[in-house]
Image (cartoon, rainbow, N blue to C red):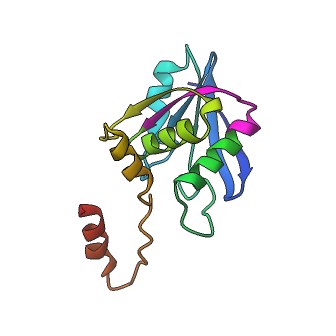
Amino acid sequence: MKRVKAFCDTPFGQVFYWTTGSGPPLLLLHQASQSSEECLQLAASLNDQYTVISLDYPGHGVSDDPARELQVPDYCAAIIAVLDELQIDKLHVCGHHSGGILAIYLALNHAERVQSIVLSGIGVRTEAGVRAVLDTPMTRDLPIDSAGDFLPKTWGVYRR
């Protein structure tokens, strides 16, 4: 699969993105702990029907690390910057896990840009559930310490 790779300047530094294929634009959004590499296999099966776009969120993959912890609106601002650079006005969006949260946010707050969304592994099925997920920070800014005390604290946060 041939990919065109590039970087886009965003309010949070440079964001890496790639495109492949031809047809209507389809944005693939990876889960928070991954990078756009997670989307490669799916892109290879879709690039004969779509122009597939994926990106590394700020602080992920080879994108720049932001100066602060980002939340859903920030990640979506970076996504919109990439779409603007590519001059894409409207597209399909597929989000996996926390990428699904970003897809929902884009559909709710940039409805004019989103033709449809596909959600994978998101686990919420009601409006209240969606609202609760959107209101929960994507990151848990827990400082790392050399003694390793952050590990049980992190587990405690994510276990909840």
Quarter of the figure with the N terminus: top right
Residue occupying the point 63% across, 59% down: 64
Q: Which residue lies furthest to the front in this view?
A: 128
Task: Identify which residue, 117 or 4, lies in the foreground.
Answer: 117
Question: In this view of the protein, can residue 3 be seen by the observer?
Answer: no
Q: Does the magenta stretch include residue 125?
A: no
Residue occupying the point 44% across, 27% down: 42
Residue occupying the point 50% across, 19% down: 46
Q: Does the magenta stretch include residue 91?
A: yes
Please state the horizontal and vertical placement of residue 26, each as a whole percent of the image: 57, 26
* 130 left or right, relative to 48: left
Task: Identify which residue, 26 or 102, lies in the foreground.
Answer: 102
Tell how many labels. Answer: 0
Please state the horizontal and vertical placement of residue 86, each as a whole percent of the image: 73, 33
Quarter of the figure with the C terminus: bottom left
Look at the image and give the residue range highlighted in magenta: 83-95
Q: Name the quadrant containing residue 159.
A: bottom left
Q: In this view, does 74 lie above or below 42?
A: below
